[in-house]
Image: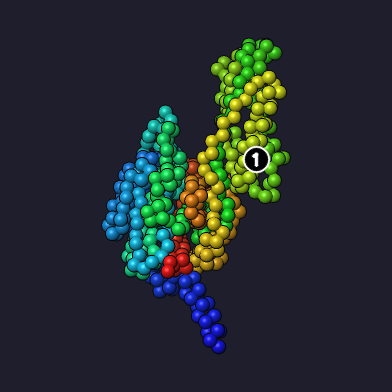
Amino acid sequence: MKKVFCILLSLFSLVAYAQAPSKLINKAEQMAKELEPKVIEWRRHFHQYPELSNREVKTSAKVAEHLKSLGIAVTTGVAKTGVVGILKGSKPGPVIALRADMDALPVTERNSLAFASKEKTIFNGQETGVMHACGHDAHVAILMGVAEVLAKNKNELRGTVKFIFQPAEEGPPAGEEGGADLMVKEGVLENPKVDVIFGLHVRSISPLGKIEYRPLGLMAASDWFTIKVYGKQAHGAAPWMGVDPIVVSAQIINGLQTIVSRQMELTKEAAVVTVGRINAGIRENIIPEYAEMAGTIRTLDDEMQKQVHEKIKLTATKIAESAGARAEVIIERKTPVTFNDAGVTEKVEASIKRAVGEQNAVRVAAQTGAEDFAFYQKKVPGFFFFVGACPPEIDLATAPSHHTPDFMMDERSLLTGLKTMLNVTLDYMYLQQKK
């Protein structure tokens, strides 16, 4: 009987740490609902006054001011314009990092919103608008709301929460470092050492109210490649007197497409090779000496990533060689796979279902977009999820995608993201209590 009692007691202890107390969760969700108008107001402010990567000066100042008003210890100037806040609970527990990205894009907004951006800038030598065309304004507002709810429940928190407001997720300007990679280099996951990290992304092409996620690879690794083709210049009327790098480039482009379609094990994971730019020549009747193409590679598996890189080099150099030309291939690794730790995913899945309802917690296929949240996940276990934000009046099939002038999100998704992040964070605190 004593043995049975001990077993029951052990099971009770496991259950007790499986989720945060329902009273605390209910209180946090009620506070989130009451905070919703303020979160919407923050989002609209950031949307109206967007700032590009590594230039988020006013954005970070507003974030830092808010965190300080909550009694959270704040460090600014991390990875150029990043803000880090540390909130220590009253009881021992894990160190949980929560991340939001702050930067906007060089896109000219095209809608009739009262708070639409009117900002202008010069980007890569061209005048352009500046727009939160990927929802980072929503991410900042949501995390500010999470910080306020958690700070006001400090006495019930187990462990420490580290709020990471990150610049330059879209990539730093040419010649600069930035983003999650630089934040990691500058020690954002240390002092105190982070045990787990959570992040989210609103998604304009997913149904409102849904939370989408998957264990393991959620978003692809993103690499960039440049292929330089060296031929021999000649008169356009006498191509046999030269080596045409434009024709060779066309053959290379066609060859690259067979890497994915014929040489990769696509039943394992998806892969993409896209040539996005090609430049060559100066005049219609001159065969140039040189051509250059550049593009992106997307993979969801480390071994496949390595294989694609090798195949691109082999394909380009051998096709060029067969035509008497020479090809030089440069591949830059940009962003790793956004990889959700399987154990962490399993632990927080119940939290997601409670936050939005089981029918709204959806496991999805991997996406070929990329996210530099992956740099944190390379160092500590992490979990990243999507928040559906497509307005119901917009057909999902024709909804404007991210990074476009017509990007649109439903602000009701802000509360969905806020509630989900609170549930995930509070549950993980109690599940992972340190003795």
Q: Nearer the viewer, residue 254 or 161?
A: 161
Q: Which residue is mark 1?
A: 307
Quadrant where the N terminus sits is bottom right
Q: Residue at x 38, y 40 (%)?
A: 54
Q: Residue at x 28, y 55 (%)?
A: 68
Q: How far across and down, in percent of the image, does residue 317 sit?
A: 65, 27
Task: Examine the image and state in which quarter residue 343 appears.
Answer: bottom right
Whether residue 412 is situated above or below residue 401 in the rendered picture: below
How would you rate the neighbour count of disc 1 (Cα within 10 Å): few for under 14, some for 14-19, many for 20 or more?
A: some
Q: How are the residues colored?
A: rainbow
Q: What secondary structure is marked by label 1?
A: helix
Which of 415/60 is in front? Answer: 60
* Image location of residue 167, percent across then percent down: 40, 44
In the picture, measured across the screen, residue 285 lies left or right of residue 428, that is right
**Quadrant where the image shows the C terminus:** bottom left
Position of 420 relative to 257 (above/below): below
Query: Which quadrant of the figure has residue 159?
Result: bottom left
- Rendered view: 432 above or below 268: below
Q: Nearer the viewer, residue 102 or 215?
A: 215
Instruction: Where is residue 394? Give x, y as percent.
Output: 52, 52
User: Is residue 57 in sight in this rendering?
Assistant: yes
- Residue 160 lies, in percent from the top left, at 38, 61
- In percent of the image, x 46 and y 56: which residue is there? 197
Q: Residue furthest bottom?
A: 1
Asked if one can make out residue 415 in the rendered structure from this viewpoint, the answer is no
Q: How many marks?
A: 1
| Residue type at numbered disc 1 | Gln
Residue visible at 41% across and 55% down?
193
